[in-house]
């Protein structure tokens, strides 16, 4: 009996030994937690990139079925109708029946271009309801639709906006998304429609360099994402942001915390990649990858 008690005492842990073990475990947790956080953020970045790539592919499918036109988007300096957008036969864009369209005449259904979420969702197996403005608005406000077009790392408060609107004050249906678009390529200028591609892929001469969609901070209305009116020939994203975009509260903001100073971008040729944001302040820091990302690059030649 005495020998058994001695053995039992020998295998017991002392208080010091327990504290050492607990300290080692705490140290390992402290080492592993940042790595797990980075891995989780990397997974979110990859998921966001996948969504943007899917949006780009949907835009390509839209162009394939609509005479080479991607969805039109942005602020239109006109009343919006098939005739005003040179699409009387409704073959260039996805349209929905809109009882609120100011161009509607007695006895006819009014038509408005579908907002990006719906125009792209049509080719992403999301089945948007285009039968009326009311039905389309109900589809856009479903939680699963909003989640689909929301970056998993986007912590900005959701602010409603419309990806297509007329300067007459007529907005398209409200939608929520974490992504900005290139209005220089997808938009239409009222007094110079010949100068703006309006989504025509044939006008994009450098599709591998001109961006289509990118991460954008919610809070600015999406139709103001990229001003089309003052763009110079061959502007890059850095040219746009440093000259036209940064001073204006209406333009898109870039989120430096969402992907740890990185941003996902989809290009007109269908590829998507993660790029580096410029250092701040812009006048003194690195340009990141913005110098090689075109906004109007080659479009207006």
Image (cartoon, helix red, strand yellow):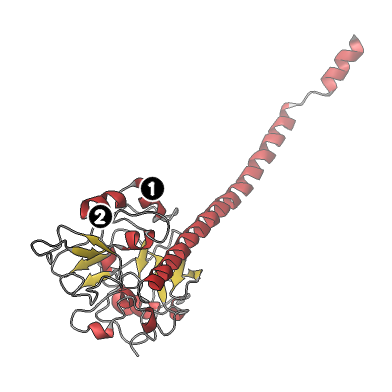
Which mark is first along the chain, 2 or 1?
2
Above or below for 87 versus 17: below
Q: Residue furthest bottom?
A: 301
Residue 214 in sight: yes
In this orientation, which residue lies closer to the viewer: 106 or 258? 106
Q: Residue furthest left?
A: 106
> What's the residue at 39%, 52% (across, down)?
155
Category of crowding for the residue at label 1, using alpha-carbon neighbours closer than 10 angstroms: few (below 14), some (14–19), many (at least 20)? few
Question: Where's the C terminus, which quadrant?
Answer: bottom left
In this orientation, which residue lies closer to the viewer: 290 or 197? 197
Spot occupied by residue 151 in the image (x, y as percentages of width and height): 42, 56
Residue 277 in sight: no
Spot occupied by residue 55 in the image (x, y as percentages of width and height): 42, 64
Spot occupied by residue 222 in the image (x, y as percentages of width and height): 29, 64
Tell me the number on the disc at residue 131.
2
Does residue 133 appear to the left or right of 46 in the view shown?
A: left
Query: Cα distance, mark 1 to mark 2?
Result: 20 Å
> What's the residue at 42%, 59% (across, down)?
124
Does residue 140 appear to the left or right of 206 in the view shown?
A: left
Q: Residue under label 1, please give it.
A: 144
In this orientation, which residue lies closer to the viewer: 272 or 98? 98
In this orientation, which residue lies closer to the viewer: 74 or 22? 74
Above or below for 49 versus 247: above
Category of crowding for the residue at label 2, using alpha-carbon neighbours closer than 10 angstroms: few (below 14), some (14–19), many (at least 20)? few
> What's the residue at 69%, 33% (across, down)?
19
Spot occupied by residue 246 in the image (x, y as percentages of width and height): 31, 72
Q: Quadrant of residue 184?
A: bottom left
């Amino acid at each position: 009996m005495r020998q058994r008690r001695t053995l039992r005492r020998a295998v017991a842990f002392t208080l010091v030994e327990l504290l050492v073990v607990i300290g080692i475990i705490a140290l390992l947790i402290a080492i592993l937690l940042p790595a797990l956080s980075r891995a989780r953020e990397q997974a979110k970045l990859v998921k966001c990139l996948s969504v943007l790539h899917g949006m780009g592919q949907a835009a390509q499918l839209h162009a394939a079925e609509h005479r080479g036109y991607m969805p039109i988007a942005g602020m239109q300096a006109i009343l919006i109708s098939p005739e005003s957008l040179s699409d009387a036969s409704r073959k260039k864009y996805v349209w929905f029946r809109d009882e609120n369209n100011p161009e509607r005449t007695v006895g006819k259904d009014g038509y408005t271009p579908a907002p990006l979420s719906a125009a792209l969702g049509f080719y992403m197996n999301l089945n948007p309801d285009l039968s009326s403005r009311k039905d389309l608005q109900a589809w856009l406000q479903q939680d699963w639709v909003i989640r689909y077009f929301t970056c998993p790392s986007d912590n900005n408060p959701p602010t409603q906006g419309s990806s297509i609107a007329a300067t007459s004050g007529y907005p398209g249906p409200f939608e929520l998304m974490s992504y900005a678009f290139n209005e220089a390529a997808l938009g239409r200028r009222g007094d110079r429609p010949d100068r703006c591609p309006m989504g025509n892929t044939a006008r994009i001469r450098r599709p591998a360099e001109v961006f289509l969609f990118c991460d954008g901070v919610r809070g600015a209305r999406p139709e103001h994402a990229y001003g089309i009116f003052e763009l110079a020939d061959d502007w890059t994203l850095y040219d746009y942001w440093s000259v036209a975009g940064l001073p204006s509260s209406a333009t898109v903001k870039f989120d430096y915390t969402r992907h740890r100073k990185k941003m996902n971008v989809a290009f007109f040729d269908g590829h998507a990649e993660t790029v580096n944001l410029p250092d701040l302040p812009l006048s003194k820091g690195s340009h990141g990858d913005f110098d090689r990302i075109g906004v109007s690059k080659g479009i207006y030649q």
